[in-house]
Image (spheres, rainbow, N blue to C red):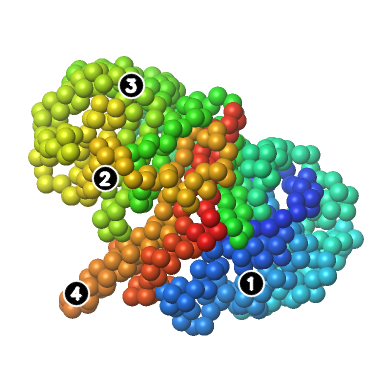
Amino acid sequence: MKRASILFSLLLASILPASAADRLEQWYNLMPKDTVGVIAIKNTPELLTDWDKSNYAKFMQDDEAKRWMAPMRKDGDTPWDKFFKDTYGSGMYDTLKDYPGALASFLVIGDISQFDKNPPNVSLCEVAGKQKEIEAHKLAEVEAKKKENADVKLRTEDIGGVSVQIAALSDAADAPWILAWAVVGDVMIEANTHALMEYMIGALKNNAGDPPGAAREHLSRIGQVTNGGGDMLLYFNGVRLLDLGEQAFAAAEAKKKADGDRAAAGRAAAGGLDIFKPKMIMDMLGAQELQAFAITAELTDTQSRMDVTILHPQKPTGLLSLMRGSSNEVTLPAFIPAGILTVSVSRMDFGTVYDGLLGMIAKLGPMAMMVTMQIPQLEGQLGFKIREDLFGSLADEVIQVQDGSGTKESQVMGFKIKDADKLGGVLEGLKRYVGAGFGAFEESDYLGFKINTLKLTQTANAATEVAFCNTGKYLFISVGGQDTLNKVLGRIKDPSGPSVWDNPHVQNLLSLVPKNYSGVGVTDAGRLMNTIATAAATLESKTGAKGKAAAKKKGPGKKALAPEEAAAAAASSWFDASARPSNETFERYFGSLLSTTYSHPDSIQVHYLTTPVEAK
């Protein structure tokens, strides 16, 4: 779906950052009332300067990285530079260099029918001293549109006392706009409808627009949560999206009634009920509690930061309630060994989660009984109560560990034990239940710890092998090979040497974030990048061999590419698998990634922070 040019520029530039929020705050006060989404950058020159200093830009200039990414430049330009040159006459960086300040774009949807190829949007950018250059980009874009459609015409029209350049599908006054721009003071307006252009011209002239609504309140709160909102913002208005979703469901229901739903009539005749309507499901999940969703980002030469923020009412009862931690104090378990790919620790009360799920199911009304009536029957077969025995035996500390290479990975989940005797009974009941028909648990010993590995009656893939180990203090569940589980158990047995938390780089990251988190995670970002590159190269190798074998087969027609084959083809068009950068190169530029989760009274915030190894 194509958007207005400034919006697309912002999307491609959103991996970068900047400063100076006064102009954006002014523009936020002028938002049209039906704003669904916002993209904003505080200061484009600072954004480009920070990008040049960032570890991402430095990585792309590294000789090893250049050789690895050579395929994407086989025609001389990267895909994004080619797009910008074809559309605006110069590459992405050179185009953005002509923007002297803030940029903002508002997606404005009043009716669900407006979600088309070019939905209503209006964008603002500062042009002081650069109006000529920016208008040249607009004219180049019009020429690019003419190459796509020879009927595109450019004309000038006076709107609100301001000269507006309009590119439309014909010379007719009511022809649909493709894009239009005008300058009021030192601000250029770009819009694709007459109504939005007229509104924003008046709003800028009078420094007043529609009364501030929920979106303005959301942006203020997001700024408070993220300590300033970052240098780049991507925001969606959950309140408006819910309204539009309900419009879509209502329209679908009306169409169904108009067309005559024979299937529904048949169900009614048989005594059935057409119960699972979309709105009921949305209400059950608490969709109305998702007030806003935002991503903010900030890059400097010493760190890269991103925040994901979800706004909700206080004390939510839907899905969002399950994402909130049970405490803002997290103990870092010392038995997580150094060198692990990724680890996270969070506070989650499974009893509360269980109650929340049942509460959501209860919103289904009479149909909820079909689910809840099955629980006692299942508990009878298991030999234990899910809420009281299983979840009642566990504390609210949850650990997740993942390790391995791009071709062989294993995961471990750890649960702190609150009642070892009760949990022991649960595990025995589970073994009996599985042994009654699914398979059996095979017991083995590792360093004195008993590991129970599930052996199914049918052959299972080694990648999905499941095992558990009860140490008395923690219950560990392993998925995949048991290498990661063995590493964790080995460090419990012999805690000498450093843990993942003792890494100086990780220590530095932990010192930079607020401590009242309900969850914290560390990822070896350099190794993760290398793992992804390795997996892509392996996939490309396998699908390439498959492709050669398929080419030898005879027969009419061509088989569509499987998803993994399509992914491999895309990867090979951008990266040279044989020139993958070394582990040291990835580590030097990406270091470790820290993630922390905060459960505020009216929001959930996930904070991501990384610093290159050289900047630690």
Residue 182 sits in quarter: bottom right
Q: How far apart are marks 4 and 1 (CA)?
A: 43 Å
Q: Name the residue under label 4.
A: 549
Q: Is residue 508 above or below residue 370?
A: below
Pointer 3: residues within 10 angstroms few (<14), some, or many (20+)? some
Task: State the residue position of label 1.
Answer: 93
Task: Look at label 3 and name its amino acid.
Answer: Lys
| Residues at marks 1 and 3, CA–CA distance in whole angstroms | 56 Å
Tell me which label, 2 or 1, sits earlier in the chain: 1
Query: Which of label 4 and label 1 is nearer to you?
Result: 1
Q: Which residue is drawn at 13% across and 25% down?
A: 432
184 vs 75: above or below = above
Do callouts 2 and 3 mark residues in contact (Cβ within 8 Å)? Answer: no
Rounded to the nearest angstrom, the CA distance separating label 2 from label 4 is: 40 Å
Image position of 440 with respect to 226: above or below: above
Q: Nearer the viewer, mark 4 or mark 3?
A: 3
Bin the neighbour count of mark 2 within 10 Å (Cα to Cα): few under 14, some 14-19, many 20 and up. some
Q: Distance between the residues labelled 2 and 3?
A: 24 Å
Q: Name the residue under label 3.
A: 418
Question: Along the horizontal axis of the image, is 164 left or right of 280?
Answer: right
Question: Which numbered circle lies on residue 487?
Answer: 2
Residue at image position (48%, 52%) is: 505
Camera-nearest residue between 290 and 81? 81
Nearer the viewer's eye, disc 1 or disc 3?
3
Among numbered discs 2 and 4, the one appearing first in the sequence = 2
Q: How crowded is mark 4: few (under 14 residues within 10 Å), some or many (20 or more)?
A: few
